[in-house]
């Protein structure tokens, strides 16, 4: 994922947590906030240390980035989206993470019709 599509700064994360909306299922939590001055969406990923060691956390982040890459042209444009992985994601494969992410994004109407 290109740098322009990432939320990296801690201040931006905190702003989205405070002013954004959230939605969750058993595997993932999504915080999102509309940013009308942006041309495209941006994502931030968070996988806590309680989920597993570095290998497991990096695999989950890799799967989430790949899922976003495949959904890239379907996602509504001017949003900042933060995805927080929960405990069950450590046992999931790419297909099930993609399905879970797709479910959350469609529930919150962040996908184009």
Image (tube, grey):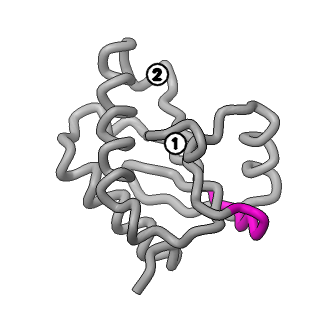
**Quick one: 39 or 36, which is closer to the camera?**
39
Q: Which mark is residue 12?
A: none
User: Percent position (x, y) of residue 57?
Assistant: 38, 23
CA separation in Å, label 1 and label 2: 12 Å
Residue pictured at 31% horizontal, 21% vertical: 56
Q: Is residue 33 magenta?
A: yes
Q: Which residue carries the number 2 mark?
A: 50
**Looking at the figure, which quarter contains the N terminus?**
top left
Residue pictured at 45% horizontal, 75% vertical: 111
Task: From the viewer's perspective, tell me whether residue 87 is left or right of residue 46.
Answer: left
User: In this picture, which residue range is highlighted in magenta?
Assistant: 31-38
Residue pictured at 32% horizontal, 39% vertical: 89
User: Percent position (x, y) of residue 96?
Assistant: 21, 52
Residue pictured at 69% horizontal, 64% vertical: 21
**Quick one: 109 or 49, which is closer to the camera?**
109
Q: Earlier in the sequence, mark 1 or mark 2?
A: 2
Q: Which residue carries the number 1 mark?
A: 84
């Amino acid at each position: 994922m290109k740098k322009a599509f990432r939320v990296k700064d801690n201040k931006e994360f905190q702003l989205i947590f405070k002013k954004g909306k959230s939605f969750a299922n058993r595997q993932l939590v999504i915080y999102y906030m509309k940013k009308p001055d942006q041309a495209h969406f941006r994502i931030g990923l968070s996988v806590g240390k309680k989920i597993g060691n570095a290998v497991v956390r990096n695999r989950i982040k890799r799967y989430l980035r790949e899922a976003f890459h495949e959904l890239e042209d379907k996602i509504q444009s001017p949003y900042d989206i933060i995805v927080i992985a929960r405990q069950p994601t450590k046992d999931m494969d790419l297909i099930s993470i993609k399905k879970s992410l797709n479910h959350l994004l469609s529930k919150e109407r962040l996908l184009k019709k």
